[in-house]
Image (cartoon, rainbow, N blue to C red):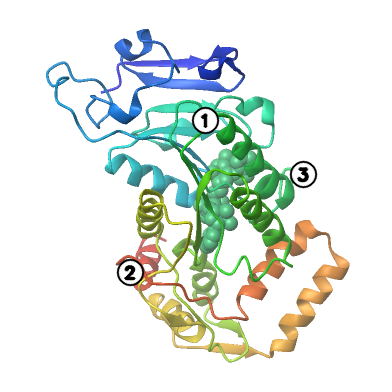
Protein backbone atom coordinates (compact mmCIF):
# COMPACT_ATOMS: atom_id res chain seq x y z
CA UNK A 1 0.00 0.00 0.00
CA UNK A 2 2.85 2.40 0.76
CA UNK A 3 4.40 3.37 -2.53
CA UNK A 4 7.13 5.73 -1.39
CA UNK A 5 9.04 6.40 1.74
CA UNK A 6 10.78 9.70 2.22
CA UNK A 7 12.46 11.47 5.07
CA UNK A 8 12.02 15.20 5.14
CA UNK A 9 14.66 17.17 6.97
CA UNK A 10 14.41 20.72 8.20
CA UNK A 11 13.10 23.92 6.68
CA UNK A 12 9.86 22.60 5.32
CA UNK A 13 7.52 25.41 4.45
CA UNK A 14 4.07 24.61 5.72
CA UNK A 15 0.81 26.47 6.23
CA UNK A 16 1.25 29.69 8.15
CA UNK A 17 4.65 30.03 6.46
CA UNK A 18 6.44 28.67 9.48
CA UNK A 19 9.76 27.01 9.02
CA UNK A 20 9.67 23.49 10.32
CA UNK A 21 12.73 22.00 11.86
CA UNK A 22 11.03 18.75 12.74
CA UNK A 23 11.91 15.83 10.49
CA UNK A 24 9.00 14.29 8.65
CA UNK A 25 8.93 10.81 7.29
CA UNK A 26 6.06 10.58 4.95
CA UNK A 27 4.77 7.27 3.69
CA UNK A 28 2.80 8.55 0.79
CA UNK A 29 1.62 7.84 -2.69
CA UNK A 30 3.52 9.91 -5.23
CA UNK A 31 0.38 11.80 -6.19
CA UNK A 32 -0.15 13.19 -2.73
CA UNK A 33 3.46 14.26 -2.45
CA UNK A 34 3.34 16.08 -5.76
CA UNK A 35 0.20 17.89 -4.67
CA UNK A 36 2.31 19.61 -2.05
CA UNK A 37 3.66 18.13 1.10
CA UNK A 38 2.18 19.62 4.24
CA UNK A 39 0.02 22.07 2.40
CA UNK A 40 -3.30 22.60 4.18
CA UNK A 41 -5.39 19.59 3.24
CA UNK A 42 -9.11 19.72 2.61
CA UNK A 43 -9.26 17.09 5.31
CA UNK A 44 -12.83 17.77 6.31
CA UNK A 45 -14.05 16.93 2.85
CA UNK A 46 -11.53 14.31 1.92
CA UNK A 47 -12.49 12.12 -0.99
CA UNK A 48 -9.80 9.61 -0.26
CA UNK A 49 -10.34 6.13 0.88
CA UNK A 50 -10.08 5.96 4.65
CA UNK A 51 -7.31 3.44 4.24
CA UNK A 52 -4.18 5.28 3.32
CA UNK A 53 -3.73 6.07 -0.32
CA UNK A 54 -5.83 7.54 -3.04
CA UNK A 55 -8.34 5.66 -5.03
CA UNK A 56 -8.56 6.31 -8.75
CA UNK A 57 -11.88 4.61 -9.13
CA UNK A 58 -14.09 6.28 -6.53
CA UNK A 59 -12.93 9.86 -6.27
CA UNK A 60 -16.38 11.22 -6.99
CA UNK A 61 -17.87 9.43 -4.01
CA UNK A 62 -18.15 11.74 -0.99
CA UNK A 63 -17.15 9.90 2.15
CA UNK A 64 -17.27 10.76 5.82
CA UNK A 65 -14.65 13.37 6.72
CA UNK A 66 -11.20 11.93 7.34
CA UNK A 67 -9.75 13.63 10.39
CA UNK A 68 -6.01 13.99 10.76
CA UNK A 69 -4.44 13.18 14.10
CA UNK A 70 -0.96 13.51 15.53
CA UNK A 71 -0.07 11.17 18.37
CA UNK A 72 2.78 11.95 20.79
CA UNK A 73 3.73 9.10 23.11
CA UNK A 74 2.74 6.63 20.39
CA UNK A 75 5.70 4.38 21.10
CA UNK A 76 4.48 3.70 24.64
CA UNK A 77 2.10 1.03 25.95
CA UNK A 78 -1.09 3.08 25.55
CA UNK A 79 0.13 5.05 22.54
CA UNK A 80 0.46 1.97 20.36
CA UNK A 81 -3.09 0.88 21.13
CA UNK A 82 -4.27 4.41 20.37
CA UNK A 83 -2.62 4.40 16.94
CA UNK A 84 -4.18 1.00 16.22
CA UNK A 85 -7.63 2.23 17.31
CA UNK A 86 -7.33 5.41 15.23
CA UNK A 87 -6.37 3.44 12.13
CA UNK A 88 -9.21 0.98 12.71
CA UNK A 89 -11.60 3.94 12.73
CA UNK A 90 -10.14 5.33 9.51
CA UNK A 91 -8.15 8.31 10.77
CA UNK A 92 -5.09 9.72 9.04
CA UNK A 93 -2.34 9.36 11.61
CA UNK A 94 0.97 11.16 12.10
CA UNK A 95 3.20 9.79 14.81
CA UNK A 96 5.89 11.68 16.72
CA UNK A 97 8.95 9.55 17.35
CA UNK A 98 12.33 10.36 18.82
CA UNK A 99 14.45 8.00 16.76
CA UNK A 100 14.09 6.81 13.21
CA UNK A 101 14.34 3.16 14.33
CA UNK A 102 11.04 3.54 16.23
CA UNK A 103 9.17 3.42 12.94
CA UNK A 104 9.49 -0.33 13.02
CA UNK A 105 7.03 -0.44 15.93
CA UNK A 106 4.23 0.48 13.54
CA UNK A 107 2.82 -1.18 10.48
CA UNK A 108 0.06 1.24 9.53
CA UNK A 109 0.90 4.91 10.03
CA UNK A 110 0.55 7.66 7.45
CA UNK A 111 3.42 9.86 8.50
CA UNK A 112 6.28 9.93 10.97
CA UNK A 113 7.80 13.06 12.40
CA UNK A 114 11.04 12.94 14.32
CA UNK A 115 11.48 15.40 17.17
CA UNK A 116 12.08 15.87 20.86
CA UNK A 117 9.05 17.20 22.67
CA UNK A 118 11.36 18.69 25.31
CA UNK A 119 13.16 20.73 22.64
CA UNK A 120 10.67 23.18 21.12
CA UNK A 121 12.81 23.93 18.06
CA UNK A 122 12.75 20.28 17.06
CA UNK A 123 8.94 20.07 16.95
CA UNK A 124 8.26 23.26 15.09
CA UNK A 125 5.27 22.76 12.80
CA UNK A 126 4.49 19.18 13.78
CA UNK A 127 0.79 19.87 14.39
CA UNK A 128 0.28 21.66 11.08
CA UNK A 129 -2.62 20.28 9.01
CA UNK A 130 -3.88 18.09 11.84
CA UNK A 131 -7.32 18.26 13.44
CA UNK A 132 -6.58 16.50 16.69
CA UNK A 133 -3.50 16.22 18.90
CA UNK A 134 -3.21 13.34 21.35
CA UNK A 135 -0.48 13.16 23.96
CA UNK A 136 0.30 10.25 26.24
CA UNK A 137 3.84 11.51 26.78
CA UNK A 138 4.92 11.02 30.34
CA UNK A 139 7.55 9.33 32.46
CA UNK A 140 7.08 7.12 35.48
CA UNK A 141 10.77 6.93 36.27
CA UNK A 142 12.80 10.08 35.75
CA UNK A 143 15.79 9.32 33.54
CA UNK A 144 18.20 10.87 31.04
CA UNK A 145 18.55 13.83 33.43
CA UNK A 146 14.92 14.81 32.75
CA UNK A 147 12.38 15.41 35.50
CA UNK A 148 8.59 15.08 35.53
CA UNK A 149 8.49 18.86 35.13
CA UNK A 150 10.72 18.67 32.05
CA UNK A 151 8.67 15.99 30.30
CA UNK A 152 5.15 15.67 31.73
CA UNK A 153 4.73 19.42 32.10
CA UNK A 154 7.14 21.29 29.85
CA UNK A 155 7.25 18.74 27.02
CA UNK A 156 3.48 18.68 26.77
CA UNK A 157 3.34 22.48 27.11
CA UNK A 158 5.69 22.73 24.11
CA UNK A 159 3.35 20.49 22.16
CA UNK A 160 0.35 22.56 23.24
CA UNK A 161 2.06 25.70 21.97
CA UNK A 162 2.45 23.99 18.59
CA UNK A 163 -1.18 22.88 18.66
CA UNK A 164 -2.31 26.45 19.30
CA UNK A 165 -0.11 27.79 16.55
CA UNK A 166 -1.61 25.27 14.13
CA UNK A 167 -5.15 25.98 15.37
CA UNK A 168 -6.06 22.36 15.88
CA UNK A 169 -9.60 21.44 16.78
CA UNK A 170 -8.97 19.47 19.98
CA UNK A 171 -6.12 18.36 22.23
CA UNK A 172 -6.40 15.13 24.19
CA UNK A 173 -4.12 14.54 27.15
CA UNK A 174 -3.84 11.38 29.23
CA UNK A 175 -3.19 12.03 32.92
CA UNK A 176 -4.14 9.46 35.58
CA UNK A 177 -6.90 8.63 38.02
CA UNK A 178 -6.90 10.83 41.12
CA UNK A 179 -4.12 13.02 39.69
CA UNK A 180 -6.13 16.05 40.70
CA UNK A 181 -6.34 14.76 44.31
CA UNK A 182 -2.65 13.90 44.48
CA UNK A 183 -1.10 17.12 43.29
CA UNK A 184 1.33 17.09 46.18
CA UNK A 185 3.16 14.14 44.55
CA UNK A 186 6.01 15.05 42.22
CA UNK A 187 4.54 13.21 39.24
CA UNK A 188 1.11 14.82 39.55
CA UNK A 189 2.49 18.25 40.30
CA UNK A 190 3.78 18.18 36.73
CA UNK A 191 0.86 16.40 35.05
CA UNK A 192 -1.79 18.54 36.71
CA UNK A 193 0.07 21.74 35.99
CA UNK A 194 -0.18 20.77 32.35
CA UNK A 195 -3.88 19.91 32.75
CA UNK A 196 -4.46 23.42 34.15
CA UNK A 197 -2.59 24.96 31.24
CA UNK A 198 -4.52 22.91 28.70
CA UNK A 199 -7.86 23.90 30.24
CA UNK A 200 -6.87 27.57 30.13
CA UNK A 201 -5.42 27.39 26.62
CA UNK A 202 -8.55 28.22 24.69
CA UNK A 203 -8.22 25.01 22.66
CA UNK A 204 -11.00 22.50 23.01
CA UNK A 205 -9.68 19.65 25.11
CA UNK A 206 -10.27 16.13 26.42
CA UNK A 207 -8.52 15.00 29.56
CA UNK A 208 -8.51 11.28 30.24
CA UNK A 209 -7.87 9.95 33.73
CA UNK A 210 -7.30 6.21 33.42
CA UNK A 211 -6.92 3.70 36.16
CA UNK A 212 -3.77 1.54 36.33
CA UNK A 213 -3.01 -0.36 33.13
CA UNK A 214 -2.85 -4.16 33.09
CA UNK A 215 0.82 -3.80 32.19
CA UNK A 216 1.44 -2.07 35.51
CA UNK A 217 -0.13 -4.90 37.50
CA UNK A 218 2.89 -7.04 36.68
CA UNK A 219 4.46 -6.00 39.98
CA UNK A 220 1.87 -8.24 41.63
CA UNK A 221 2.77 -11.06 39.25
CA UNK A 222 6.48 -10.65 39.97
CA UNK A 223 5.90 -10.93 43.73
CA UNK A 224 3.52 -13.86 43.21
CA UNK A 225 6.11 -15.73 41.16
CA UNK A 226 8.31 -15.79 44.25
CA UNK A 227 5.44 -17.21 46.30
CA UNK A 228 4.36 -14.28 48.50
CA UNK A 229 2.56 -11.03 47.75
CA UNK A 230 3.17 -8.17 50.17
CA UNK A 231 0.44 -5.60 50.76
CA UNK A 232 0.32 -2.53 52.94
CA UNK A 233 -2.62 -2.67 55.31
CA UNK A 234 -5.41 -5.23 55.04
CA UNK A 235 -5.69 -5.03 51.24
CA UNK A 236 -9.26 -3.76 51.20
CA UNK A 237 -8.64 -0.84 48.84
CA UNK A 238 -10.21 -1.42 45.46
CA UNK A 239 -9.21 -0.70 41.88
CA UNK A 240 -10.35 -1.56 38.37
CA UNK A 241 -7.30 -1.73 36.12
CA UNK A 242 -7.76 -1.58 32.36
CA UNK A 243 -6.25 -3.17 29.26
CA UNK A 244 -4.59 -0.73 26.82
CA UNK A 245 -6.87 -1.75 23.98
CA UNK A 246 -10.04 -1.07 25.98
CA UNK A 247 -8.59 2.22 27.19
CA UNK A 248 -7.68 3.30 23.67
CA UNK A 249 -11.27 2.65 22.62
CA UNK A 250 -12.59 4.78 25.50
CA UNK A 251 -10.08 7.55 24.69
CA UNK A 252 -11.10 7.86 21.06
CA UNK A 253 -14.78 7.81 22.05
CA UNK A 254 -14.07 10.71 24.41
CA UNK A 255 -12.18 12.55 21.68
CA UNK A 256 -14.95 12.08 19.15
CA UNK A 257 -17.68 13.02 21.62
CA UNK A 258 -15.77 16.10 22.79
CA UNK A 259 -15.87 14.99 26.43
CA UNK A 260 -13.80 17.34 28.54
CA UNK A 261 -12.81 15.07 31.39
CA UNK A 262 -13.27 11.32 31.64
CA UNK A 263 -12.37 8.76 34.22
CA UNK A 264 -11.76 5.33 32.76
CA UNK A 265 -11.37 1.97 34.48
CA UNK A 266 -11.61 -1.66 33.47
CA UNK A 267 -14.70 -3.88 33.72
CA UNK A 268 -13.83 -5.60 37.00
CA UNK A 269 -13.39 -3.97 40.41
CA UNK A 270 -10.98 -5.91 42.64
CA UNK A 271 -9.65 -5.39 46.14
CA UNK A 272 -5.87 -5.46 46.40
CA UNK A 273 -6.27 -8.74 48.26
CA UNK A 274 -8.29 -10.25 45.40
CA UNK A 275 -5.71 -8.99 42.94
CA UNK A 276 -2.88 -10.58 44.92
CA UNK A 277 -4.76 -13.89 45.03
CA UNK A 278 -5.35 -13.71 41.27
CA UNK A 279 -1.63 -13.20 40.65
CA UNK A 280 -0.71 -16.16 42.87
CA UNK A 281 -3.32 -18.38 41.17
CA UNK A 282 -1.89 -17.46 37.78
CA UNK A 283 1.40 -19.11 38.90
CA UNK A 284 -0.47 -21.99 40.55
CA UNK A 285 0.91 -20.95 43.93
CA UNK A 286 -0.84 -21.28 47.27
CA UNK A 287 -2.47 -18.05 48.45
CA UNK A 288 0.18 -16.43 50.61
CA UNK A 289 -0.33 -12.73 51.26
CA UNK A 290 1.63 -10.84 53.90
CA UNK A 291 0.12 -7.65 55.29
CA UNK A 292 2.58 -4.98 56.29
CA UNK A 293 1.34 -2.39 58.78
CA UNK A 294 0.45 0.88 57.07
CA UNK A 295 2.96 2.84 59.16
CA UNK A 296 5.75 1.05 57.23
CA UNK A 297 4.37 2.56 54.04
CA UNK A 298 4.18 6.04 55.51
CA UNK A 299 7.62 5.72 57.06
CA UNK A 300 9.13 4.51 53.76
CA UNK A 301 7.72 7.53 51.94
CA UNK A 302 9.10 9.82 54.63
CA UNK A 303 12.53 8.18 54.50
CA UNK A 304 12.71 8.30 50.71
CA UNK A 305 11.54 11.91 50.54
CA UNK A 306 14.09 13.03 53.09
CA UNK A 307 17.08 10.97 52.11
CA UNK A 308 16.88 10.47 48.35
CA UNK A 309 16.44 12.76 45.36
CA UNK A 310 13.08 13.21 43.65
CA UNK A 311 14.46 11.01 40.85
CA UNK A 312 14.42 8.09 43.28
CA UNK A 313 11.47 8.85 45.47
CA UNK A 314 9.12 10.16 42.72
CA UNK A 315 7.91 6.76 41.46
CA UNK A 316 7.87 5.22 44.95
CA UNK A 317 5.76 7.96 46.54
CA UNK A 318 3.38 7.63 43.58
CA UNK A 319 2.93 3.84 43.87
CA UNK A 320 2.81 3.87 47.67
CA UNK A 321 0.27 6.70 47.75
CA UNK A 322 -1.91 5.06 45.10
CA UNK A 323 -1.91 1.83 47.13
CA UNK A 324 -3.46 3.59 50.10
CA UNK A 325 -6.72 4.65 48.52
CA UNK A 326 -9.56 3.31 46.41
CA UNK A 327 -8.97 3.83 42.69
CA UNK A 328 -12.26 3.03 41.06
CA UNK A 329 -13.37 4.61 37.80
CA UNK A 330 -16.45 4.05 35.61
CA UNK A 331 -15.99 0.65 33.94
CA UNK A 332 -15.11 0.27 30.27
CA UNK A 333 -14.15 -2.59 28.03
CA UNK A 334 -14.34 -6.33 28.24
CA UNK A 335 -10.83 -7.56 28.88
CA UNK A 336 -10.18 -9.23 32.22
CA UNK A 337 -7.01 -9.09 34.26
CA UNK A 338 -7.10 -12.84 34.92
CA UNK A 339 -6.73 -13.54 31.18
CA UNK A 340 -3.89 -11.05 30.96
CA UNK A 341 -2.09 -12.66 33.91
CA UNK A 342 -2.61 -16.15 32.45
CA UNK A 343 -1.18 -14.98 29.13
CA UNK A 344 1.87 -13.37 30.73
CA UNK A 345 2.55 -16.54 32.73
CA UNK A 346 2.10 -18.71 29.64
CA UNK A 347 4.58 -16.61 27.69
CA UNK A 348 7.18 -16.44 30.47
N1 LIG B 1 0.93 2.79 33.30
C1 LIG B 1 -0.15 3.05 34.02
O1 LIG B 1 -0.66 2.21 34.77
C2 LIG B 1 -0.79 4.39 33.90
C3 LIG B 1 -1.99 4.62 34.53
C4 LIG B 1 -2.61 5.85 34.40
C5 LIG B 1 -2.00 6.83 33.64
N2 LIG B 1 -0.81 6.60 33.04
C6 LIG B 1 -0.22 7.68 32.24
O2 LIG B 1 -0.55 7.45 30.88
C7 LIG B 1 0.48 7.93 30.04
C8 LIG B 1 0.92 6.83 29.08
O3 LIG B 1 1.34 5.71 29.83
P1 LIG B 1 2.15 4.52 29.14
O4 LIG B 1 2.15 3.38 30.10
O5 LIG B 1 1.65 4.31 27.74
O6 LIG B 1 3.60 5.14 29.12
P2 LIG B 1 4.91 4.55 28.45
O7 LIG B 1 4.67 3.19 27.91
O8 LIG B 1 6.01 4.72 29.43
O9 LIG B 1 5.14 5.53 27.21
C9 LIG B 1 5.56 6.85 27.44
C10 LIG B 1 5.67 7.60 26.12
O10 LIG B 1 6.22 8.88 26.42
C11 LIG B 1 7.39 9.04 25.62
N3 LIG B 1 8.44 9.76 26.34
C12 LIG B 1 8.97 9.45 27.52
N4 LIG B 1 9.96 10.31 27.82
C13 LIG B 1 10.05 11.16 26.79
C14 LIG B 1 10.87 12.28 26.50
N5 LIG B 1 11.81 12.69 27.33
N6 LIG B 1 10.68 12.91 25.33
C15 LIG B 1 9.72 12.48 24.48
N7 LIG B 1 8.91 11.43 24.69
C16 LIG B 1 9.07 10.79 25.84
C17 LIG B 1 7.91 7.67 25.29
O11 LIG B 1 8.70 7.75 24.14
P3 LIG B 1 9.96 6.78 23.93
O12 LIG B 1 9.37 5.44 23.54
O13 LIG B 1 10.72 7.41 22.84
O14 LIG B 1 10.69 6.73 25.24
C18 LIG B 1 6.59 6.91 25.11
O15 LIG B 1 6.09 7.12 23.83
C19 LIG B 1 1.61 8.40 30.96
O16 LIG B 1 1.56 9.79 31.13
C20 LIG B 1 1.30 7.71 32.27
O17 LIG B 1 1.78 8.42 33.39
C21 LIG B 1 -0.20 5.39 33.15
Q: Residue at x 59, y 52 (%)?
A: 199
Please, what secondary structure does the residue beneath circle 3 have?
loop
Quadrant that contains the C terminus: bottom left
Please, what secondary structure does the residue beneath circle 2 have?
helix
Left or right: 159 with respect to 348?
right
Q: Which mark, residue 339?
A: 2
- Name the residue carrying label 3: 145
2 or 1: tag closer to the N-terminus: 1
The CA distance from mark 2 to mark 1 is: 38 Å
Mark 3 vs mark 2: in front: 3
Asked whether mark 2 and ligand 1 are closer than 8 Å, the reply comes as: no
Judged from this view, the residue extending furthest toward the top is 34
Please, what secondary structure does the residue beneath circle 1 have?
loop
Vertical comparison of 52 with 203: above or below: above
Q: Residue at x 65, y 58 (%)?
A: 192
- Name the residue carrying label 1: 127
Label 1 CA crowd tier, 10 Å (few <14, some 14–19, many 20+) = many
Vertical comparison of 284 with 101: above or below: below
Q: Residue at x 59, y 30 (%)?
A: 165
Position in image of residue 254 (x %, y %): 40, 55
Q: Are marks 3 and 2 in contact (CB under 8 Å)?
A: no
Position in image of residue 270 (x %, y %): 43, 81
Label 3 CA crowd tier, 10 Å (few <14, some 14–19, many 20+) = few
3 or 2: tag closer to the N-terminus: 3
Q: Residue at x 39, y 69 (%)?
A: 266
Amino acid sequence: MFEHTNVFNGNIQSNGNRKNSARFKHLSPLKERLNGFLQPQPSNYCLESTTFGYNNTNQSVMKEPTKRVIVAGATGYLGRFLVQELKTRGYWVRVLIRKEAQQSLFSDVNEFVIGQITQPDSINGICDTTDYVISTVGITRQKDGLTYMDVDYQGNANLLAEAKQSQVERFMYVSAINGDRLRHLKIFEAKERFVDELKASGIDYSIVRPNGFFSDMQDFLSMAKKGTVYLFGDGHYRLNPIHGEDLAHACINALENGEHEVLVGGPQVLSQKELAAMALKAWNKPIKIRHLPDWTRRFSIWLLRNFTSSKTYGPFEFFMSAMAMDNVAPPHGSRHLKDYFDEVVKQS
